[in-house]
Amino acid sequence: MYNTLEPDPMKIEIKKIGNSDGLLLPRELMQRLDLKRGQQLHIVELPGGGFQLLPYDPDFERTMEIADELMDKYRDTLATLAK
């Protein structure tokens, strides 16, 4: 049974596009997810054989979180070095 708070699952077919293969996303989905033509997506493989597409790089996101933590921890030292 699916969660009633989430949209219904959508079937998307892998199609041949020129010499490559690709996914065609319905306009409704593009609008709902605020995706733009040409935008890069990052794929994360999930346990069990699934995957997740993200509009941002999760590794970069985590790196920025660590940088923020370090800057908070060493705020006084960084301020002194910046002079």
Image (cartoon, helix red, strand yellow):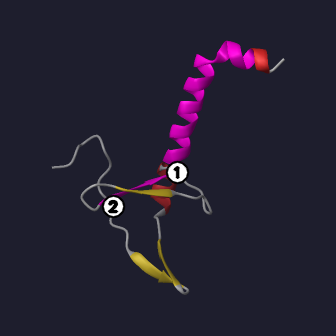
Quarter of the image for residue 38 reads bottom right
| Rendered residue at 30%/59% (across/down) | 50
Mark found first going from the N terminus, 1 or 2? 2
Q: Main secondary structure of the magenta part?
A: helix
Q: Where is residue 24 in the image (x, y as percent from the top left)?
A: 47, 70
Residue that numbered label 1 is attached to:
55
| Amino acid found under the numbered disc labelled 1 | Pro
Furthest residue in direction left, as rendered: 1
| Rendered residue at 49%/46% (across/down) | 58
Quarter of the image for residue 73 reads top right
Quarter of the image for residue 43 reads bottom left
Magenta stretch: give its range: 50-79
Q: Where is residue 7 in the image (x, y as percent from the top left)?
A: 32, 49
In-front residue for pair 46/80: 80
In the image: residue 27, left or right of residue 11: right
Q: Position of residue 70 (x, y in %)?
A: 58, 25
Q: Where is residue 40 in the image (x, y as percent from the top left)?
A: 58, 59
User: Vertical placement of 35 versus 80: above or below?
Assistant: below
CA gap between label 1 and label 2 equals 18 Å
Where residue 10 is drawn, which disc sits there?
2
Crowdedness near tag 2: few (<14), some (14–19) or many (≥20) residues, C-alpha within 10 Å = few
Quadrant containing the C terminus is top right
In-front residue for pair 83/2: 83
Crowdedness near tag 1: few (<14), some (14–19) or many (≥20) residues, C-alpha within 10 Å = few
Mark 2 residue element: loop
Between marks 1 and 2 in the image, the one whose residue lies nearer the viewer? 1
